[in-house]
Amino acid sequence: MTVLDIRNISIDFPTSKGVVHAVSDVSLSVPQGRRIGFIGESGSGKTTTALAAMRMLAAPGFVSEGEIHLNALGDTDILSLSEEEMRRVRLRKISYIPQGAMNSLNPVMRVETQIWDGILAHEAGVTQAELQRRSDAVLEGVGLDPKIVGRLYPHELSGGMKQRVCIAIGVCLQPDLIIADEPTSALDVITQRHVMQTLREVQARIGAGLILIGHDMGLMAQSVDDLAVLRLGELVEFGPVRQILENPQHPYTKELISSVPLVGGESFLDPTPAEVPKGFTTQDGTPLLELRGVGKTYGAVTALHPMSFTLDGAVPKIISIVGQSGSGKSTMGSLMLGFSPPSTGEVLFKGQDINRIGKADQLTFRKQVQAVFQDPYACFNPFYRVDHALKFPFKRFGLAQSEDHVRHAMEEACRAVGLDPSLVLSRYPHQLSGGQRQRLIVARALMLSPNLLIADEPVSMVDASLRSSILKNIHDLKDRHGISIIYITHDLATAYHVSDYVMVLYKGHVVEAGPPKDVIGDPKHTYTRLLIDSIPWPEVGRDWGSADDARAALDELARIGGTPRTVYRGDIPGFTLRQG
Amino acid sequence: MVEQNLGDKAHPGATRPPGAPPPDLTARQVRRMKRFDNPWRNPKLIWGAGLLLSIVALGILGRLFWDTDLVFTGSGMPRQAPVGVENIRGQIGSWAHPLGTDVSGKDLLALLIVGAPNSLYVGVLASLIGMSTGIFLGFTAGFVGGRTDDVIRVLSDVMITIPPLLILVVFQAAYGDISLTLMALLIAAFVWQSPTRLIRAQVLSMREAGYVQMARLSGASTGHIMFREMMPNLVPYLFGSFIANVTTSIVTAVGLEVLGLGPQRIPTLGRVIYDAINSGALIQNLWWWWGIPTLLLAVMFIGLLLINLGLDEVSNPRLRRL
């Protein structure tokens, strides 16, 4: 039985620049109990198509052609329903699980009251006892204790719990179709696995169809039955997920699949470096960067427990710091840049405490230590064209010989990160995508050729296909200019390939450290193992485990939460790590 | 993906499937959408600026084409009505005094030519001084922080609670006759608090912004960060706050003048209204005497209001409607 039938649908958005065809001629049907994934990069029309089925398109957008049929409504086209009729369809027949659960729940209402709200909007005369019974049942269905969680307010829940509450609201009326729009995008991999498993189990129990919107091929492989690949508003490929993964037809699908780096997979780096790495050495052997018992606390919260390491720059290396959000990895970056002083210990750069550098030497220090920040949207001053961000430090550090030289250097840096300089340099930041901005930030850092680069998620917003090529460029430039790199990331697969040494951070502790082949390839610490198990790989055969497995793993993690012991997995020359 | 020819797409009416939300794009709406490509070409902004410029133009053109010496007592017959209107004694207004005269024979047109720009001048000057103080204190508080911040914050918070008119009345009553500039200075002492608070808040949040961190990373000096990185992004707020302050300043100035506390010898709109009230213009049905200056004040305020609304839409695209 087909739950939802989308026939030749086209969606247009009139703008001042002309009509944007967000979706053109997409046909698709969702059978009962089957999970369909919509995959594609941002702007490919995947959310727009799903929202059209809910009749919830954003303001100027409208369905210009096509029909949408819902099995429960018989022959009537969804698009011809009145607003009141449509209201009765929403949640009861089609429910929507939004992307940002933290913003989707009403902050002043208890969780169970919000579930009752949904029920009462569709059914009159439900008694209080009946409401209570039903909300308890759905909360239990998503693995939350109704006695406790039902009485809580959204701010008292974690991100994963909030997302599961959203799922509970979505399934409380047992709809025919659930649309989940990147339900795990704001969650870390461990929670993501738990939420996805919960969603799958609930969906299977009520036998609804599921549309899962996402951009992560790995997540799709683990969660859906059929996959629809969308690109620029067109459906380029549709079929069972196994068939698409094993035998993709469209070049774009092939690109999507091949671009996902795998742990233990083939490296995207050149096996032999093009030239002998150029390093930095001091006469007396002072390390490039040294942390002595550095810790950071914010009030009662310890972001980073005291740790020490020394990094010498003789052979430029990439040191990866990996962990979930809140593990203290960004705090480490900011400490090494001297943006926030450590609560204990000191950070030394070439033997000098970076928090005690005089005004005169400040510029020299800045010139040698550069960074790529996490959020590319905030990194550009909206008032200036983007070349300001590249030109200003170049001139400020006295690297510029002439205007021509500046322009030449900027163009070269842009090309190194795969950008066309004539297209991007004279634009304003809002005219560029997140990925383009992020690449410009990388270009900026590379063009200043510092001794040390702190790269905080430098490629998080770039499409997977470009990710590996930019990392490859960073890797090559590291050798050419002798740049030592601290690579802060949550992406274990790229860390596995590019880095020389990996530190796994958990709640401000280094739990496991060593060469990537050991730490990520063969993890020993419970946390590292859990982290790696939770990554969704684009392999259909691999079992992601059930929601109970995920919950058991989370419980085990909570048990070791206190003071995890560091597992040392071997050393590399030029880098030593100690705890405390 | 983007089609440039919107013309034929503007009326898809017939081909639309029944029930789809109507696109309803008339040519008028397309024109309105086009306008948003350049937010500064905002109709409210343009109309508001036009109204204010008309006051300035009145001052300039009036001085060129009209005799401003007619502001003195006895320049003409008293109580003359505007052109073509009969006054209470049955005299019909003449072109010698197109807007009529007051009880002492002052020419009303000349009074407005001199008075209206004066009122605007007081407002703009007071607001300029207040803004400059606000920018300076706001940046200092936000950037330096610590004790300096505490002092500036407490000072501006305390000053905001003091009703300005009360203090000004006391001050002016003690001082007697003052010049326009001194009046502007006095008013300025009451309009620097809100820009200070506004800018302090903005600077505090901007200090943590990515591009400011980026500038620090690029070795930028404090001056560069303040004036080259932060200031340009504050422009819409500064403009908005400036315009709001001009309004407040003019209201305060006119209020004082209507109470008879403004400059005694210099014509301003408030002063004209004060004289009119004082000489029983309402009872004698000399409506042009108080009516026309009030109208000019209304034009000024509507102009300022429109500019403020326009700036709001410029800096906050969500307010722009199709």
Image (cartoon, rainbow, N blue to C red):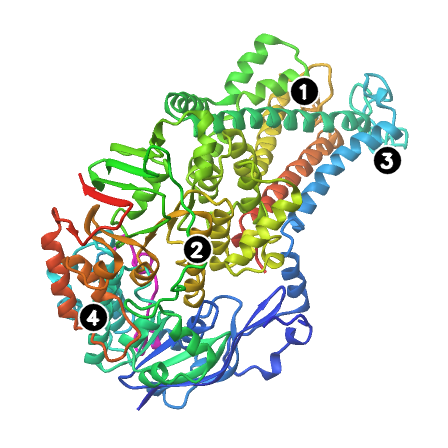
Q: Indicate yes or no whether the magenta region holds residue A98.
A: yes
Label 3, on which residue? B83
Q: Is residue A383 visible?
A: no
Q: Do discs 2 and 3 belong to a common subunit?
A: no
**Would residue A537 be found to the left or right of residue A147 on screen?**
right
Protein chain holding label 3: B
Image vertical order of residue A318 relative to residue A50, above or below: above
Q: Position of residue B246 (x, y in %)?
A: 61, 31
Query: Which circle, 3 or 4, is nearer the viewer?
Result: 4
Distance from Cα at disc 2 to Cα at disc 1:
81 Å
The residue tagged with tag 2: helix, strand or loop? helix
Label 1, on which residue? B278
Protein chain holding label 2: A
Label 4, on which residue? A198
Tell me the quarter of the image containing the C terminus of chain B. Answer: bottom right
**Three-letter code for the amino acid on which mark 4 is drawn:** Thr
**Magenta region:** A89-109
**Would residue B39 be found to the left or right of residue A133 on screen?**
right
Observer-nearest residue: A467 or B286? A467
Q: Is residue A274 visible?
A: yes
- Disc 2: CA contacts within 10 A as few (<14), some (14-19) or many (>=20): many
Label 2, on which residue? A474
